[in-house]
Amino acid sequence: MIIENNAVFFNDLLIFRDEPSVEFTDFIKKAYKFLKIEYPKFFKMDNLSKLAFTGADIILRDITRDKEENNVALVLANRSSSADTDIKYQKSIENKSDYYPSPAVFVYTLPNICLGEISIKHKLYSENTFFIFDRYNEDYMANYSAYLIQSGKAEKVLCGWVEFLKGNYRLAFYLYI
Amino acid sequence: MELLKEELKNKIIEVLNLEEVVPGDIADDAPLFGEGLGLDSIDALELIVLLDKDYGIKVTDPKDGKVIFKSINALASFVAENKTK
């Protein structure tokens, strides 16, 4: 599952595309509506969480639907952590004469918040981890996912890369069974 | 007062990113939290920031929010009585 350049691919098939000139916020809103995600809290999320949530929903919606609890571990990574939202929040507090820090922005100043958003929607009561790497470390992520399954800590593992910084983004998710 | 209620509805929708809500969806006497708009504790904090930023009202005890944010009617009355800008 890949989301990049305003296009969504699932199992190598293009399922949604928007014009490359469209900004991420508009693209992801159109993708949300096209995919019929129907989750109002989506619009409160920061860009990293919107991206991760959309990618996860495409993979998990048929797996977790109608179940009260799901044992799908989440193992994600990126390069820029939550820097995109950190910068936005820092700007809101840098001017002492206009000092109105936003609680709604502050809660997204950690990269693993997106794991919580996915877990709430899909009722995941399982392991989750968010790594910060310079680049996607495929061997490490695959080995970690395999360990979670082989040790019985998870039935499945949603694993992958979700990066967002200053409008540049890429998501690549895999499901290990 | 009606203009203030409409203004508050628009501001709430904007600052809380209630993408699929329009002012007409918010009844003046409906609860804003819980069964109403389904707002949560972070939304309450965001509304406290809104009161400070746009109306010069400082709510120092978040527990006061239960009364202030009970409904649009309650919020409009509170803002009308306490605003400093």
Image: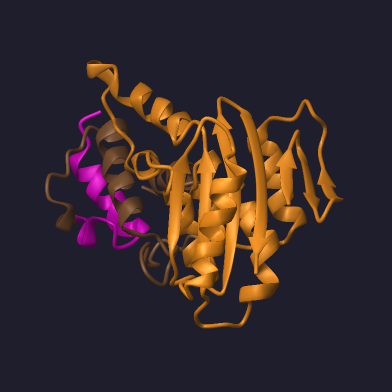
Is B75 contained in the magenta span? yes
- Residue B21 seen from this side: no
Residue A175 in the image, given as x and y percentages of width and height? 66, 61
A42 in relation to A91, above or below: below
Q: Residue at x 72, y 61 (%)?
A: A36
Q: Nearer the viewer, residue A92 or A57?
A: A57
Q: Residue at x 45, y 63 (%)?
A: B37
The residue range painted magenta reads B65-85
Q: Main secondary structure of the magenta part?
A: helix
Residue A141 in the image, given as x and y percentages of width and height? 55, 50
Q: Residue at x 40, y 49 (%)?
A: B5
Judged left or right of residue A55, residue A125 is left
Judged left or right of residue A98, residue A159 is right
Q: Colour of chain B?
A: brown
Judged left or right of residue A119, residue B46 is left
Q: Colour of chain A?
A: orange
